Image (spheres, coloured by chain):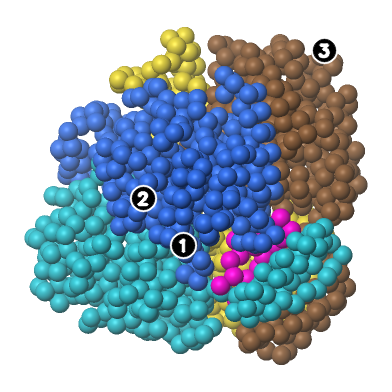
Chain colours: A blue, B cyan, C brown, D yellow
Amino acid sequence: MIVVVNNNAAKEQFDNLINWIESQNVRVHISSGEYQTVLGLIGDTSRIDTELLEGLDIVSQVTRVTEPFKNANRKFHPENTCIDCGNAKIGDGHFGIIAGPCSIESEEQIIEVAKAVKEAGADFLRGGAFKPRTSPYDFQGMRADGLKLLIEAKKETGLPIVTEIMSAEHLPLFEDVDVIQVGARNMQNFELLKELGKTKKPILIKRGLANTLKELLMSAEYVMSEGNENIILCERGIRTYETATRNTFDVSAIPMLHELSHLPVIADPSHACGIARLVKPLALSAAAAGADGLMIEVHNNPQKALCDGAQSLTPAQFKETAQAVKNVLQAIKGDV
Amino acid sequence: MIVVVNNNAAKEQFDNLINWIESQNVRVHISSGEYQTVLGLIGDTSRIDTELLEGLDIVSQVTRVTEPFKNANRKFHPENTCIDCGNAKIGDGHFGIIAGPCSIESEEQIIEVAKAVKEAGADFLRGGAFKPRTSPYDFQGMRADGLKLLIEAKKETGLPIVTEIMSAEHLPLFEDVDVIQVGARNMQNFELLKELGKTKKPILIKRGLANTLKELLMSAEYVMSEGNENIILCERGIRTYETATRNTFDVSAIPMLHELSHLPVIADPSHACGIARLVKPLALSAAAAGADGLMIEVHNNPQKALCDGAQSLTPAQFKETAQAVKNVLQAIKGDV
Amino acid sequence: MIVVVNNNAAKEQFDNLINWIESQNVRVHISSGEYQTVLGLIGDTSRIDTELLEGLDIVSQVTRVTEPFKNANRKFHPENTCIDCGNAKIGDGHFGIIAGPCSIESEEQIIEVAKAVKEAGADFLRGGAFKPRTSPYDFQGMRADGLKLLIEAKKETGLPIVTEIMSAEHLPLFEDVDVIQVGARNMQNFELLKELGKTKKPILIKRGLANTLKELLMSAEYVMSEGNENIILCERGIRTYETATRNTFDVSAIPMLHELSHLPVIADPSHACGIARLVKPLALSAAAAGADGLMIEVHNNPQKALCDGAQSLTPAQFKETAQAVKNVLQAIKGDV
Amino acid sequence: MIVVVNNNAAKEQFDNLINWIESQNVRVHISSGEYQTVLGLIGDTSRIDTELLEGLDIVSQVTRVTEPFKNANRKFHPENTCIDCGNAKIGDGHFGIIAGPCSIESEEQIIEVAKAVKEAGADFLRGGAFKPRTSPYDFQGMRADGLKLLIEAKKETGLPIVTEIMSAEHLPLFEDVDVIQVGARNMQNFELLKELGKTKKPILIKRGLANTLKELLMSAEYVMSEGNENIILCERGIRTYETATRNTFDVSAIPMLHELSHLPVIADPSHACGIARLVKPLALSAAAAGADGLMIEVHNNPQKALCDGAQSLTPAQFKETAQAVKNVLQAIKGDV
């Protein structure tokens, strides 16, 4: 870590800073310039709080040289990680397609969709039981009842299931869930992350809507530092000034996360754009950029249930997309 | 609500959409143009899900005419709200200054700061017991023990206390807390918001780092729709591309929130910039723009405890800032 | 266009607004609600200034139903446009790869790179003569002398050439240039755009670093409204809060621009990320998302000229990338 | 400047980098760690191109210790600069209020507004003759004819005048203009900035809608490096994800620019929000944060000319705002 100190700092403040840094079990290398003094911090700086240093009046800049994530860092684990999720895998050459409805609505609906996506090439079934909604007046999901129906669909089809958790209190309900999803809005719900770290379940962490890649990796680190190393990262679009799409799909996050971390990285094109007709080109772009999997919303009957029609594909559209994705994967084999 | 539909929509899709809208207890007024058809939705549209409509292939645009927040909306409650917080008030002419350390560290520290900020003009004492940190390796706060020390400081000085909650499970510990703070990272932790709605405590909700003003008001709505109308809103800087300050302090949020809502609005200049020497000008700018209060980090002894020194003011700097704020309030009296 | 007016507007203000709108040769349809009145503006609203309306105190919202761009709009020109650029084409099935160095440095350099990229599969040669640089102390390009060398390389290889213009005063120097590029920083240099509209040259317009897709199309409209319809649009990354890459490559811009406009859309993965090792995955993602071409920086000798090494590929890396792109194009044929 | 190099760099690449750096007349101090090597660049690094270094495969991070702007840098010019603009001044204790209409429309209009704003407390008259508009179909200003009317109004009232330039070719028309404004969209029109550097006129540079403070200072540097040191900086709102206001007014830019530079800093609350009723609170917040002046849109007759009514104040509203600003300036005297 490099800390730049203004030369107009009082000697007492400067000495105080050096003493504090050394008390953190880190050595300091001092080099003085005309206007600034540059401190090089050597040793394990992952416990040093950069925001604290940046806020000091005498400090003009702080730069991390080594990222503060350890367990998730490719530097210390050069090999790709593959996550075992029941009878499917994601990462290190295993491409996983997760598909299913935004919300679980009825037994008939979830089982029908489950069968359709299995037939069309999905490796996992997704379905929302606990739904985070911006408005308290919007449908909040079938909650515990929905989870039961999802587990029913798993039994029926053999597909491993992925669903979102919104509070650690609900963990006992997730026993038969194969992959627990942490949604974008809870990416920095640290109390929840710590509890998930005490399980052994695969955890799929979605990037928060204004979080950096390093913050995403620090959230993975929260889970991993408690002992659970089964993490799947998910790019799902970030918030920018552009309003033509609901979010801006940051496709470069895929190769960049692969560079920073050994964990598998998937993409959610449905939430990234919020528009069904863009799901296919974005799914293809993610596959071409080296993603380890995709998460795609699929509904069963747009004629009956409008609610499903939003950013979801029909089973037929999904099948066509899954096939095109496989063609792209074939084309880039050994390439990205 | 206005929904623009492409004229190339199939008749079945179009009819299906109209039927669905009408099933939501809303009337539809249809006007056809050359390339698009405009639907005017009349009635209570607060339960209509705009994201769902936007995602439909046949829909090219959705615009809300009436905001979906009701309890927080100034349209339905034109008078300013004043929140009673123990023996202090915020809103409708009552300006409240909340001051104290980032983290509670010891009994001596919190009591010393409490006395200092009271003497310097603070109306409330703040102090962090549960600390949300980006890194699992950073100090996570004294937690339950910290809360006890904060309550001690309240007894000693008579100042009402403000502190952050990170999980609904901790609620029983907050019985003697006067104002419960929901941090920026939990602004859309909806399970937590619902639980806080079942209490009668004043809730201070900080704007999330990439949340819109309307989303902030929807989060207030989550608490209010459960029966707790004691909400204080807080602007604390948003995430933008600019890196010269930690966040970008959105001072225009203050008059804009006053226009949209009857709830009091305070500002947190310490977190907004992350730099002690900018706290005073930003505090003055917030007061000049019509804020109902301020939340300012103050530490006791920068020579001993570096950790406090970051974006915090010394008691002397805080006193000077509080006095300058009062001068500005006097200058704009009856003005903004 | 839909304009929402508050019902507390004074009658005089309201009448004044209606009169003004009608003076713009647009009809108004008025529907009154309890709190607001909704005005539907019918007719050619492309000349109505929305910012002006939004700023009025009595107006709470303005929504365009028809986009204000006409010449660039797919609605009025459903067929894809193909741009003829000397002996190469871009758009409507013609995929064009533009490659070459960031800056032209010497005759030897540009001719060597030209030959290398031609051999490796490029359809166009690019090279910067006039260079927009954030700092006045950075290299500003070889300017007129650089242009001459670029034209030399065109003669030598037969590749059509693409290069950036920074001021309309330089137009006479661009006579032998095949495609004139407008850089991101000049996307809203309207005086320049108007002058380019008076030529018949293909104009490649790069998206500004914080411009929306609709603003990009309005800039195309500036050129087209003066009579030059030969426009190529280019996505090159936008500015967001994320700092892991220089910009955030908005891959969804590609399918979305195709939906809004009939003009060809290419991508510049080199500037989008600023990192050579990400150029290939981003190039593949753009091709997979339906781009009509790519613009890639290639240098000749990283051992000698460090300056070229930045975000540029070596000819060998470019050849490998171009081949992989062709594989992806083959895989998605008839698909996106 | 600090450059972090990965330890997996090939020796040849590493040596090449060191040689290149040394060829830039800068010394290099090398310190090796387990995973990275940190290079400290000592000497005048203002001519080193950081983007180039960042893009190198072997480089993982580049940090400037000394900002690359010299003439604008407070470090080298600790005293505040005061800009002399005809018979008014801005900076170093001189607060300047610039007021006038968005567009010049007629002799009667501009002279009427000029008299009104002078009477209400303005120090400068502004008025747009050349207007940058997103759409080619919007009013582009009266151009040369408008400039003549503005000069007429200057003669009539004695107020110095401020107006925007869009192309260096128009410079001869600006001889009688007191302050030449560079608009947000042209902040990085470097060819224009260089030409303005050859004049002696005060130049008011508006921050681009997605430009950092350091980029704004580099644009000032473009003008100053050509010999013209009469620069006024202007914060006018930046583009963020928030849509409640047209832009997000970055009030913290004011104290931060004062810290980085000796140049005067003014604010434009009218463009920052785009809503007349927010102009007053934002003007007060800017004054409270230490601005050296304000630029406010004022029109004469909202009943006749709707176009003026947008984000502009009436003369009466402007008078009230100017008075309130003076009260705030009085309150913070010697304070920020």
Q: Where is C202 relative to C119, above or below?
A: below
Q: Where is A95 relative to C308, above or below?
A: below
**Left or right of B220, for residue D303:** right
Q: CA distance from mark 1 to mark 3?
A: 69 Å
According to the picture, the residue beneath numbered tag 1 turns out to be A142
**Left or right of D236, for residue B294:** left
Q: CA distance from mark 3 to mark 2?
A: 68 Å
Q: Where is B176 relative to A49, above or below?
A: below
* Same chain for the residues under marks 2 and 1 in the image: yes
Tell me the number on the disc at residue C156.
3
Task: Report the magenta residues as a range.
Answer: B47-66
Q: Residue at x 87, y 65 (%)?
A: B34
According to the picture, the residue beneath numbered tag 2 turns out to be A174
Local SS, label 3: helix
Q: Position of residue B158 (x, y in %)?
A: 15, 77
Q: Position of residue B264 (x, y in %)?
A: 40, 77
* Same chain for the residues under marks 1 and 3 in the image: no
Q: CA distance from mark 2 to mark 1?
A: 14 Å
> Callout 1 environment at 10 Å: few (<14), some (14 to 19), or many (20+)?
some
> Callout 2 environment at 10 Å: few (<14), some (14 to 19), or many (20+)?
some
Q: Residue at x 28, y 48 (%)?
A: A195
Q: Which quarter shows the C terminus of chain D?
A: bottom left
* Same chain for the residues under marks 3 and 2 in the image: no
The subunit carrying tag 1 is A
